[in-house]
Image (tube, helix red, strand yellow):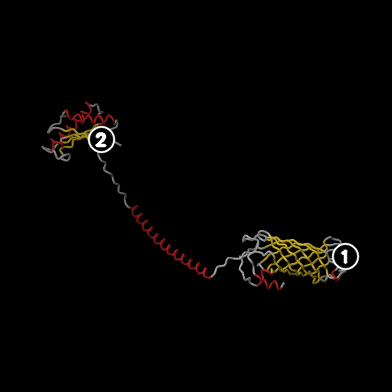
Amino acid sequence: MLAVAAMSAQVNAQTVVESKNFDNWYIGINGGASVPTPKFKDMANFQGGIRIGRWFTPAVGLAIEGQAIMGKKNFGEYINTFVKATNVTFLGTLNFNNWFAGYAGTARPFEVIGVAGLGWLHQFGDPKYNAMSSKVGIDFALNFGSDKQWQLYLEPALLYCIAGNYQKVKYDLSNAMFQANLGLVYKFGNSNGTHNFKIAELRDQAEIDGLNAKINELRADVNAKDSKIAADGRTIADLQAKLAACEARPVQTVVEEKKENILQPMVIFRQGKSTIDAAQYASIEMVAKYMRNHKDAKVVVRGFASPEGKAELNQKLSEKRAEAVANALIKRYKISKDRISTQGLGATDKISEENDFNRVAMFIDVTEK
């Protein structure tokens, strides 16, 4: 046991993936025959048991084993039970292959494992017998399965009763007994995805230095982006302030000037006249046709005069010209009076550079859209 404790303090030359609390456990059953020493001649001739353990490193582990010792008349006529005695042992385990040759990354097909520990032996019957026991043995193990999760081992071992209440027992049971056990073990699955230890993927110093340089580069990049984000934040704050100032200003309403819809036909008058020449009715008829085709259309007839003469006379003349054209639409072409209005705008020189073309009446479509 002291040797196993010393072994467990050693650092394995290889680094394996860190185990969690429920990793590297196993359970197994075993059974075999016993060969007693001469003074141990009445001990049982066969035994069977169960072993539960855990490997803490690929080389060192601990286990607890319970065995039932059986046989007929092996303890004397005063023991009538089928199971004559039980022995519970706390074992240290040492994998010699992994200790001396290093761990191969998975269990080897064949391994040699040492076991040793202290236990407690209890004999049934009257008088009862209890003794501290010790066990030392060696397992010749065969690993098999898709992931070496099964292990079959042959174990020769020495079981020795160290001390007990011998004074009440007919026979001296303080001697050794040799055992040969055959066992089958199942290794539970681990968090590393296997049923055994897994070698860690180590990195050399050059790779670590390269990774550190990359980390520093990424940090510098992050700092630069943080500065850019801060600058963008200031820009956004400035724009928000300008937006707030704009929103605080009085709203200026811009009224778009509506363009007049001037119909193309115009009625031309002689100088100083407000009567319509026969040739000019063609223009009036075109407007009348337009108003018939557009039942909702409304028209303003605007009259103008050329700039010769007095303004008062030109104003009256422009009004008469507009009224004359409106009356033609109403009386001659049967357009409803409420769809027509007139305006006399007096003298103008804006329509044409020729005065003859400033003596006109024109049509403005004022239909509401």
Q: Quick one: 137 or 286, which is closer to the camera?
A: 137
For image coordinates 34% across by 56% down, the residue present is 242
Q: Position of residue 125 (x, y in %)?
A: 85, 63
- Residue 104 vs residue 171: left or right? left
Q: Quick one: 132 or 159, which is closer to the camera?
A: 159
User: Label 1 amino acid?
Assistant: Gly
Q: Tag count in the figure?
A: 2
Furthest-right residue in view? 77
Q: Which numbered tag is attached to residue 212?
A: none
For image coordinates 69% across by 65% down, the residue present is 110
Q: Quick one: 237 or 181, which is closer to the camera?
A: 181
Q: How crowded is mark 2: few (under 14 residues within 10 Å), some or many (20 or more)?
A: some
The answer to which quarter of the image holds residue 113 is bottom right
Q: Quick check: 294 above or below 217? A: above
Q: Position of residue 20 (x, y in %)?
A: 63, 63
Q: Is mark 1 on a helix, strand or loop?
A: loop
Which residue carries the number 2 mark? Answer: 365
Give the foreground label among 1 and 2: 1
Q: Which numbered tag is attached to residue 76?
A: 1
**Alpha-carbon span between mark 1 and mark 2:** 137 Å
User: Label 2 amino acid?
Assistant: Asp
- Residue 159 vs residue 279: left or right? right
- Residue 238 vs residue 70: left or right? left
Q: Quick one: 257 or 227, which is closer to the camera?
A: 227
Q: Position of residue 159 (x, y in %)?
A: 79, 69
Q: Where is residue 136 in the image (x, y as percent from the top left)?
A: 75, 70
Q: Which quadrant holds the C terminus?
A: top left
Q: Residues within 10 Å of mark 1 (few under 14, many from 20)?
A: some
